[in-house]
């Protein structure tokens, strides 16, 4: 029996402790941590939180929204949808949210798929009307019937978490697969995760790698992290530490704390790259400053091996890697 190396130990801690986050966006973060419930739940609905609804991030168990792009103004419902977006992005008083809900409903009833998804998001969160998971499910299905890719992802999340429906991994898999094949990168990440963990489908790490790769190449940090982890372990793909390091680095540069911990650990041991203790401290410090303390013990041990000047420089560089907090004014979701 051999002892785990530092990198292997950190990989075990980061991935196994938070498997869902690192592997997919399942709970829509799917790579760095197991799916866990949000604490800022919207009153009356444990399925969604204000943070999940407001932010564009494809994390945790959120239902995702995305910027409005390439709208066809001649299509029925598009103008009403834009009015709803403007109101949803305004100061979120009860009146403006009710008006946004009304405009989205008008557009949704005209068959405009983006508005149907937006209405589902508001219905699930309880924006402008009491929370209604059943209504959210109905409108997502209507959008999905039109082949609207983002609806497949959101439906997958509902079935994954049992929101308004019985939890059904097979149906979640089906919805994520449709979204993934339609080119939705978040659905690709979650589909990879289901293959990775054998949820709703037979475990197949090679297929997981295929879908993680597509999401990773689209710039999804969770996909990059999960793909890196497979290369590090040699599961479903050849064991290639240099490739693992490269993907961890891409995810770390986007602020993914699990990837930052793994990157720091690989720098500390010189695996997949040249050994560099100051860089190891820099990335581990950045993760700690972001509130992820899983690499703290390793960081403290490394700092004893550096001079006070090196430690100070690493901490200063780490500060520059920490994302600036966003003002609440700009956390309002940009809807479809």
Image: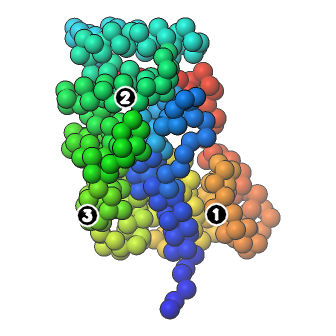
Label 1 Cα crowd, 10 Å radius (few <14 / some 14-19 / many 20+) = many
Write down the quadrant of residue 322 in the picture: top right
Locate residue 239, reporting x and y percent. Answer: 35, 74
Q: CA distance from mark 3 to mark 2?
A: 30 Å
Residue in front for this viewpoint, 45 or 202:
45
Disc on the earlier residue, 3 or 2: 2
Label 3 Cα crowd, 10 Å radius (few <14 / some 14-19 / many 20+) = few
Q: Nearer the viewer, mark 3 or mark 2?
A: 2
Colouring mode (rainbow / by chain / secondary structure / one colour): rainbow
Single out the residue that lies furthest toward the bottom: 1
Q: Is residue 72 visible?
A: no
Look at the picture and state if 192 lies above or below 44.
below
Locate residue 253, reporting x and y percent. Answer: 51, 50
Q: Which mark is residue 202?
A: 3
Disc on the earlier residue, 3 or 1: 3
Q: Pointer 2: what residue?
A: 134
Residue at 19% from the left image edge and 29% from the top image edge: 145
Disc on the earlier residue, 1 or 2: 2
Residue at 56% from the left image edge and 53% from the top image edge: 257
Q: Pointer 1: what residue?
A: 295
């Amino acid at each position: 029996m051999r002892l785990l190396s530092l990198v292997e130990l950190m990989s075990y801690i980061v991935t196994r402790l938070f498997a869902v986050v690192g592997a997919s966006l399942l709970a829509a973060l799917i790579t760095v941590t197991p799916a866990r419930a949000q604490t800022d739940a919207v009153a009356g609905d444990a399925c969604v939180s204000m943070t999940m609804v407001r932010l564009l991030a494809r994390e945790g168990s959120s239902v995702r929204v995305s910027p409005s792009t390439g709208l066809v103004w001649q299509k029925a419902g598009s103008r009403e949808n834009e009015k709803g977006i403007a109101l949803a992005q305004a100061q979120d008083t009860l009146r403006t949210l009710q008006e946004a809900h009304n405009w989205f409903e008008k557009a949704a009833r005209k068959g405009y798929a983006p508005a149907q998804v937006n209405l589902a998001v508001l219905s699930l969160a309880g924006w402008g009307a009491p929370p209604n998971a059943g209504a959210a499910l109905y409108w997502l299905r209507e959008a999905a019937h039109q082949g609207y890719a983002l609806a497949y992802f959101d439906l997958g999340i509902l079935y994954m978490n049992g929101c308004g429906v019985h939890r059904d991994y097979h149906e979640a898999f089906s919805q994520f697969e449709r979204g993934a094949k339609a080119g939705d990168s978040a659905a690709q990440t979650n589909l990879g995760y289901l293959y990775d963990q054998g949820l709703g489908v037979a475990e197949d790490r090679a297929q997981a790698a295929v879908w993680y790769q597509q999401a990773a190449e689209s710039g999804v940090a969770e996909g990059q992290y999960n793909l890196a982890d497979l290369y590090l372990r040699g599961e479903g793909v050849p064991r290639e530490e240099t490739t693992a390091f490269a993907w961890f680095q891409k995810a770390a540069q986007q602020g993914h704390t699990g990837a930052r911990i793994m990157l720091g650990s690989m720098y500390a041991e010189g695996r997949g790259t040249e050994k560099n203790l100051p860089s190891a401290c820099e990335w581990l410090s950045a993760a700690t400053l972001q509130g992820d303390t899983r690499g703290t013990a390793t960081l403290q041990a490394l700092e004893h091996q550096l001079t006070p000047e090196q430690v100070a420089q690493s901490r200063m560089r780490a500060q520059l890697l920490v994302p600036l907090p966003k003002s609440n004014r700009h956390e309002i979701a940009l809807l479809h």
